[in-house]
Amino acid sequence: MKPERLKRLLFHVGVTLGTPTIHLLFSLNKHLVLNGAILTDALAAGRSVLLCCWHGRLLFPFYFLRGRGGRAMAGLHADAEVISRIGDRMGWKMIRGSTTEGGRGAYQELIDTLSKGGSLAAITPDGPKGPQHRVKPGAVRAAMLTGAVVIPVSGQASRRWEIRNWDTFIVPKPWGKTCMVFGKPIEMNRKSSFRANSHRLEKELNRIQEAVDAAVIDKT
């Protein structure tokens, strides 16, 4: 199936049957989660956590961390409508808007969430429209302002559809293996360097993406 046709099909499926479809696709795979204690230990210590995942890999934390009452930011464009509906039904509390569109209210809601100890929020720092794998300011500024610990996360599937737009969005196919990996926690505060923090986050997201790709590709 051509990518554009697949994209249109997945949009309509996503709006009507998104959540059961994602559940079905993931349930027909074997699963592996690496370094999961990084997240559980941070939350157990009463830390607020900002999960950061490249946009193309967001289905993995959406699925594996469902039902925890975390908040996640989704834009206002058509693709984000699908993601938002899926997230709502998986138990995420969606923040509609981004640090650039829908802007100030959504960003303030993110700040308010992270200012409460033990809270969990998620953002795609290269979303909603790219460029791919380039950290935008919002996530870093939110962590610096609130002191939330940033935990990078990524995922991959050994069998997958790759939907290409401004990025490559991964959807697992049945009968393979999925893997999600947590990266090294990144501490930020008001006095730290914005530029250095952005570089550290970008570098770690790319590192764990390479690691999770190596963990599952051609190793079914």
Image (cartoon, rainbow, N blue to C red):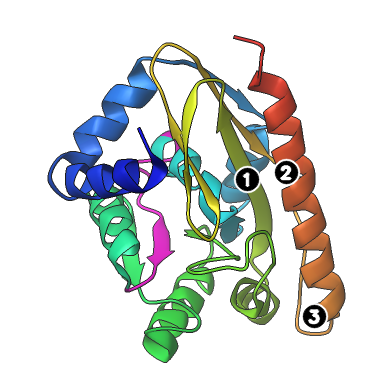
Mark 2 element type = loop
> Is 68 in the magenta?
yes
Mark 3 element type = helix
Within-10-Å neighbours for mark 1: few <14, some 14–19, many 20+: many
Of residues 60 and 150, the one drawn nearer to the viewer in this rendering? 60
Residue 164, given in percent of the width and then of the height, sits at 49, 49
199 on left or right of 89: right
Lower sequence index among marks 2 and 1: 1
Mark 1: which amino acid? Answer: Val
Q: Which residue is mark 3?
A: 194
Mark 1 element type = strand
Find the distance from the CA under tag 3 to the CA under tag 2.
20 Å
Find the distance from the CA under tag 1 to the CA under tag 3.
20 Å
| Quarter of the figure with residue 155 | top right
Magenta-drawn stretch, dominant element (helix, strand or loop):
loop
Of residues 4 and 168, the one drawn nearer to the viewer in this rendering? 4
Residue at 83 percent across and 84 percent down: it is: 191
Q: Which residues are magenta?
A: 64-76
Q: Are marks 3 and 2 in contact (CB under 8 Å)?
A: no
Mark carried by residue 183: 2
Q: Quadrant of the C terminus?
A: top right
- With respect to residue 48, does 5 lie above or below? above
Mark 2: which amino acid? Answer: Gly
Q: Quadrant of the N terminus?
A: top left
- With respect to residue 209, does 48 lie above or below? below
128 on left or right of 202: left
* Residue 90 at least partly seen: no
Residue 65, given in percent of the width and then of the height, sits at 44, 40
Residue at 35 percent across and 70 percent down: it is: 95
Find the distance from the CA under tag 2 to the CA under tag 1.
6 Å
Mark carried by residue 153: 1
